[in-house]
Structure formats: C-alpha cells, structure tokens
Image (spheres, rainbow, N blue to C red):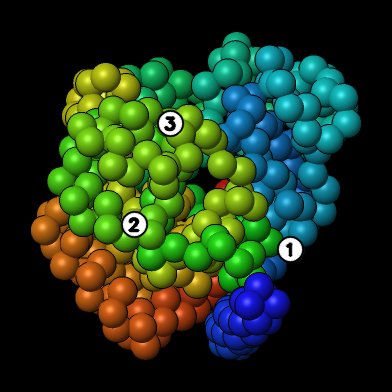
Amino acid sequence: MALVGKNDAARQGFIDGYEVGYTNGVRLGQCEAIIQKAVRDREPNPIWDVRVLYVTSGKGYPYEPLDHALINSLRPLVREMIIGNCANDPIRIGSPAADLETLAAVYQPDLMLILDGMNLSLDVVDRIRGMGVRTAIWLTDDPYYTDFTISMSTHYDYIFTLEVNCVSLYQEMGCPQVHYLPLAFQPELFRPKAVPNGQQRDICFIGSAYWNRVAMFDKLTPYLANKQIFISGIWWERLKHYELLAPQIQLNTWMPPELTATAYNGAKVVINMHRAYDDQAYNNNSRRILGASPNPRTFEISGCGALQITDFREDLVNFYTPDYDIVTYASPEELVEKMDYYLTHEEERKQIALRGLYRTMRDHTYANRLTKLLSIIFGQ
C-alpha cells in the first residue's frame, strides 16, 4: 500500500509540476513578445557628448539599488561618467571615492548630477558651482520632506522633482530651472521571470506599514485571511488582528529588488498603496502639499507583468489608463471588489497586466527619464 501511495504522489507531483511549468512558460513567452514590441516602439536614446559627475545618495539601502539603476542607465547616454560619493556614503559604488571638489577640478564635468542630496554639504555644492560646473539634483521623496528640501533647492542650477505638485514650490523659492521628473524602473531587475514552485500567491503587498496603510489593511484583513497572500515590510505588527495574517507576513524586512520582483511575478494581484502626505509621525511636510504623482513601485510592479491595483493619484492618468493597463481603487470596499473580480477573471487580469507591461517597457525606464533630463540641460 505504501508503494502505491508513493507512486500516486509522484504522479500527482509530475502533473502539478508540469502545470506550473507550462503556465510559467506560456506567461513568459507572452511577456517576452510584449517586451520586444515595446523595445521596437521605443524612441531611440541619443548620446550626449558630455562628461557627467554622478553623486550617489549616500543613504545606503534602500537607495543603493536606485543609485545602481541610474548609473547603469546614464552611462550609455553620455561620453563619460565619473562616480562620486557623499562623504558618509557607506556603499562606495565604484572605485574608492575621491573628494568631490577634487573630482570636479580634475575632470571639469559638464554636469554634476546628485541623487537626493540630503547627505551632501551645500557648501561643497556652492564651491563646485563656483568652478563653472552645472549642478542638478533629483529629489526622490517629495512631498514628504519638503521642509528640508526647500532650503537645499536654491543651491542648484536645476531641480528635478518626482512630485508634480512640488514644481511651483521650488519656483516660488526662486529656483530658475524646476522640472517634473518622476522615478521609473530598471528593466534588468523588474521584469517577468519564472517563479519557484510554492511562491505563487493570490495577493501581494510590499512596503512599510505607514499608518494609512495599517488603517486600510485592518479593513482588508477579513478578506485577506482567506486568501494566499504575501506581505513584506516593517511595522506590520501594528495591525489590529496581526495574528490572522502573521503566517503570511515577512516582518521587518527590506526586500532587495531581485526578491521583490520574484514576489510580484508570483502574485495574481499586486496592491500598490502610496504613503499619506499628511502623516505627521514620519513626514516633514508642514505645507501639507498633496501627493499627486505615482511612486516608483507603480512602474516596478507593472514592469514585472503583474496586475496592479493601485490607489488613485491625480497624475496617474499621464502614465497609465485606468482599467486598461492598470486598475485603481478609492476605498477598501472597492479594492476588495476588484481583487475578487480579477482573481476569478483570469484572462482579463492577464490582458491588463500585459498592456501595463508594454506601456512600462516603452515609456517608463530610467533611460527614458535620464534622456529627458539630459535634453532639458543640454538640448536634443
């Protein structure tokens, strides 16, 4: 009897494995066809005959993957790139860091581009500007820390902000060149890929448990408790009924991009939820500037070919078409309704996800964004 049981188990294992492999293969084949079409339809990126000094954020993880994404995307677009580090940068991307002023004096770059800039001395920026070097900063956390960034803004020739509602703020501060430039995604990391057996889920959410998210997930808990889910991030023990979801929560972990992409690929539905602009516990946004622009997860999720259901932001329609290549919600009840619908309407779910993948691969890479940045500064 035991032998028969083993044979039955082996047979069932083969059937299950074949089904998972076949499903993965079909999905990846469809996604690859979409990616190739998006690449063909993408505008070719020009190359600028300029030398750029790129200065890392100096914040380590989770900014380190963003630094790498920008470095890898910027390098093919310019004649030469030098990598500089903030004095307290713990990651030391590239060769050992030299003093930024020394790098500027030796290489005489056409542009110094700074990511975030919170850990960079403004005196250093002023002295490098005094050498005749153009300076630009890409602000990555607007509007949440605008109490700090407004004091930095006038020290740069160009301000690029990922929040459309912050453009007027920096203009009012007297900045001569302020431009809206949202973040994007890195196709080498966030892309469709095979998922190991056992990592398939109905629903996935990755991110920190800010209080607005806790309030939302407290209302979602009865629904999620009956689904296969995966939640990862810090502070999720704040949930009122944490014990109901605890077995499916990876607590107090910053997931690296590779594992995040695997989680997105393994989920039928991925929830995206922006942090609140008025969270007084974590923000420094005394002007209470509304957040209207999409976060980088918007592009990373869709870049994996997953169905994304996101809270609506006013500027989202300039990047995606709701209910065509992305799905939106405005309340916990609507989110549950839409999750339930797309979990049981597989073909519609796949088609929206594939259209989102196409739009993202064509329009929302870091190469796209940096092409716009360089065009603004140096012209086409």
Residue 47 disc label: 1
Residue 268 disc label: none
- Determine whether, in the image, residue 53 is placed left or right of residue 15: right
Q: Is label 3 or label 1 in front?
A: 3
Q: Label 2 neighbourhood size at 10 Å, few (<14), some (14-19), many (20+)?
A: many
Mark earlier in primary sequence (3, 1): 1
What residue is shown with label 2? Answer: 271
The disc labelled 2 sits on which kind of residue? Ile
Q: Residue at x 83, y 23 (%)?
A: 97
Q: Is residue 29 visible?
A: yes
- Determine whether, in the image, residue 27 is placed left or right of residue 56: left
Q: Nearer the viewer, residue 150 or 23?
A: 23
Measuring from the top left, give residue 4's x and y in whole percent. 65, 81
Q: Are marks 3 and 1 in contact (CB under 8 Å)?
A: no
Q: Is label 1 or label 2 in front?
A: 2
Q: Label 1 neighbourhood size at 10 Å, few (<14), some (14-19), many (20+)?
A: some
Q: Tell me the quadrant of the picture where the C terminus can be found.
A: bottom right
Q: Residue at x 55, y 26 (%)?
A: 117
The disc labelled 3 sits on which kind of residue? Ile
The disc labelled 1 sits on which kind of residue? Ile
Mark earlier in primary sequence (2, 3): 3
| Element carrying mark 1 | loop
Q: Residue at x 74, y 36 (%)?
A: 53
